[in-house]
């Protein structure tokens, strides 16, 4: 049972991990993260999931909610390892916060992608619809991409019930 504050999130299709401020699942060929925070626990869960289901994961969608906070140094180191393991899979990142926070996060992501030798080039979006549209074009028919918005809504409803 994958429980978060007494609610069985494991009853939702594809949910692989849940914790304080995040739900992680696989929908079709997409690794999906809905989070209000990043911490070491989450990064380790993502790495374990990617390692165990690597051949099934074609792309990734990360949705960071409006209250998202930048991670600490230890979490960023784990994130670096995770990014290397993702390889060249298409990655769409949605930041739902507005204003300066989103602009700063976009700048950090863009700078990081250009300064590293990593093949991963995450695309940053302000809306879930835009991110899903881009993933559809990048993945051309991967199972589950067409209804990612509905899947994220399901995860969001379950998370808000906790």
Image: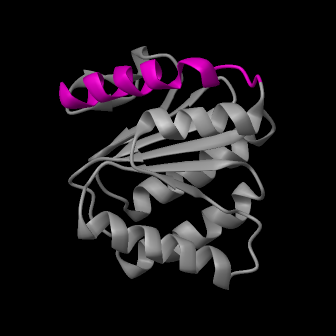
Q: Is residue 159 above or below residue 40?
A: above
Is 76 or 7 nearer to us in this picture? Answer: 76
Whether 151 is among the magenta residues is: yes
Tell me if residue 89 can be seen.
yes
Residue drawn at 25 percent across, 57 percent down: 98
Q: Quadrant of the C terminus?
A: top left
| Dominant SS in magenta | helix
Q: Position of residue 35 (x, y in %)?
A: 35, 47
Percent x, y of residue 38: 37, 59
137 in relation to 158, above or below: below
Query: From this viewpoint, which residue is outermost toward the right?
Result: 55
Q: Is residue 17 visible?
A: no
Q: Looking at the image, which is closer to me, 2 or 86?
A: 86
* Residue 57 percent across, percent down from the top left: 72, 37
Whether residue 70 is situated above or below residue 97 in the rendered picture: below
Range of residues picked out in magenta: 141-162
Residue at 23% x, 63% y is 99
Q: Quadrant of residue 118?
A: bottom right
The front one of 41 and 129 is 129
Horizontal side of 56 relative to 59 (left or right) equals: right
Give whichever of 3, 14 is nearer the camera: 14
- Left or right, 96 with respect to 27, comes to left
């Amino acid at each position: 049972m994958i429980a978060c504050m007494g609610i069985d999130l494991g009853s939702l299709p594809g949910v692989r991990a849940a914790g304080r401020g995040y739900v992680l699942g696989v929908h079709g060929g997409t690794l999906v993260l809905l989070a209000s925070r990043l911490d070491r626990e989450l990064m380790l869960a993502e790495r374990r999931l990617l390692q165990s289901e690597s051949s099934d994961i074609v792309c990734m969608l990360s949705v960071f909610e409006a209250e998202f906070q930048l991670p600490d140094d230890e979490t960023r180191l784990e994130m670096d390892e995770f990014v290397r393991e993702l390889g060249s899979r298409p990655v769409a990142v949605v930041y739902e916060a507005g204003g300066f926070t989103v602009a700063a996060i976009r700048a950090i992501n863009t700078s990081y992608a250009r300064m590293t030798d990593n093949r991963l080039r995450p695309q940053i979006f302000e809306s879930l619809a835009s991110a899903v549209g881009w993933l559809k074009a990048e993945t051309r028919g991967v199972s589950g991409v067409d209804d990612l918005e509905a899947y994220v809504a399901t995860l969001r409803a379950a998370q808000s019930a906790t």
